[in-house]
Image (cartoon, helix red, strand yellow):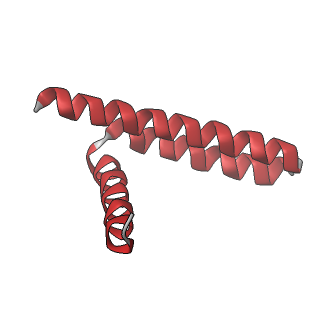
């Protein structure tokens, strides 16, 4: 894979996340809840293992929503 194509791939990935953030109301809600969970984790002083679990859960939910938004957008096309 050429260096330019890798940069283009990352640019497209971040563009997709940005579009999902701007247009996807569910993504905005889930991102707000994710920030609330992070703040709660800081307040309750969770352990390192619990942080790993929290971040993995948040990342999987946001990834699933991005995939759902993508499939919906492709369906509308």
Tell me: residue 51, above or below residue 15: above
Q: Work out whether residue 46 can be spotted.
A: no
For the residue pair 23 and 70, the one nearer the viewer reads as 70
Quadrant housing the C terminus:
top left
Tell me: residue 2, above or below residue 53: below
Tell me what residue is drawn at x 60 percent, y 41 percent. Answer: 58
The picture quadrant where one finds residue 7 is bottom left
Spot the residue most to the front.
1
- Taking the image as shown, residue 72 lies to the left or right of residue 25, namely left
Tell me: residue 6, above or below residue 51: below
Figure label count = 0
Quadrant housing the N terminus:
bottom left
For the residue pair 23 and 10, the one nearer the viewer reads as 10
Tell me: residue 7, above or below residue 43: below
For the residue pair 26 and 66, the one nearer the viewer reads as 66
Image coords of residue 19 (percent x, y): 28, 52
Image coords of residue 27 (percent x, y): 40, 41
- Taking the image as shown, residue 60 lies to the left or right of residue 51, namely left
Image coords of residue 50 (percent x, y): 82, 42
Spot the residue most to the left.
77
Q: Work out whether residue 17 can be spotted.
A: yes
Tell me what residue is drawn at x 46 percent, y 33 percent. Answer: 64
Image coords of residue 74 (percent x, y): 19, 32
């Amino acid at each position: 894979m050429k260096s330019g194509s890798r940069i283009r791939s990352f640019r497209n990935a971040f563009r997709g996340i940005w579009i999902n953030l701007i247009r996807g109301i569910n993504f905005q809600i889930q991102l707000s809840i994710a920030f609330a969970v992070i703040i709660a984790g800081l307040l309750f002083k969770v352990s390192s293992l619990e942080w790993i679990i929290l971040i993995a859960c948040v990342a999987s939910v946001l990834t699933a929503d991005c995939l759902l938004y993508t499939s919906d957008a492709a369906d509308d096309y």
